[in-house]
Structure formats: C-alpha cells, structure tokens
Amino acid sequence: MEEIAEGVNNLHIAAPDSYKNNRIQVSNTKKPLFFYVNLAKRYMQQHNEVELSALGMAIATVVTIAEILKNNGLAVEKKITTSTVDVKDESRGWPIQKAKIEILLGKTENFDELMAAAAEGDNKEQS
C-alpha cells in the first residue's frame, strides 16, 4: 500500500501539447446549440480566435455553430482539419474509428463593434 501512495505522490501530470485554452469540444447531446455559439463568442473576445472540435455525430453541430458565427459577421474561417481517430467502444471494448473535425475561426474586423452593438441592444431590452 505504501508503494501505491508513493507512486501517487510522485505522479506528475502534464497537459498534452494538443491542449489549447481556446478549444471547445462540442457534443450534440450535452449542451444546447447556442451555449456553444455564445461560448465561442466569449473565446474569440479573449483569444481572438476559437477552435471548435467534434467527433462523429457532433460534427454537424460544429459546422452549424461555425456557420451561425460566420453568417452573423462575427467570424472568418482560418483552417478546417478532418481526420479519423480511434475511440474505445465502451460496450464492446475494442477501438472503433470516428470522424473528427476541427474548425479554427478568427474574429472579423468588425467583431468588437458587432458585439458592442449586441450588448447595447440587450441592455435596452432589459430597461
């Protein structure tokens, strides 16, 4: 038992290189669509860009989020990456391949103006 405790005490967990604090991993079952849209806006305010990432069936959700932001004049596409990843199937116990997409969006030139106008509109509605 002491060996286990010693091993835990000596354990160092490093964040993987792929970890980014402007990445949103989207699920199509956990949160509503506009939760992710608003989160992406906040990330773009803080980091000037946001990376939307999804696997399998959630890919359509990521594309929809990106299109909403683009159509509202808030974001421009910088990069789109697609790949397949091995994911362990919980029910069967063996790996299955899933499609993956990563969409990097950047702020448009008038992002800050549009966000300020939207915030002003929200304040008038609350008055």
Image (cartoon, helix red, strand yellow):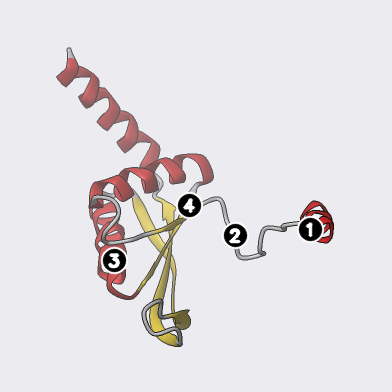
User: Residue 83: x and y, percent?
Assistant: 45, 82
Give amino acid for label 1.
Met
Give the position of the N terminus as an image quadrant.
bottom right
Q: Quadrant for the C terminus, please.
A: top left
Q: Residue drawn 24% across and 55% down?
A: 68
First along the sequence among labels 4 and 3 = 4
Pointer 4 residue: 49
The image quarter containing residue 5 is bottom right
Between 59 and 113, which is closer to the camera in this rendering?
59
Task: Name the outermost residue toward the top.
Answer: 127
x and y, in percent, of residue 108 in the image: 39, 49
Q: Which residue is mark 2?
A: 19
Under mark 3, the amino acid is: Val
Residue 41 locus on image (x, y percent): 37, 44
Decide: marks 1, 4 in contact (CB < 8 A)? Answer: no
Q: Secondary structure at mark 2?
A: loop
Residue 63 numbered tag = 3
Foreground tag (3 vs 1): 1
* Residue at 30% in and 37% down: 114
Q: Earlier in the sequence, mark 4 or mark 2?
A: 2
Q: Which residue is mark 1?
A: 1
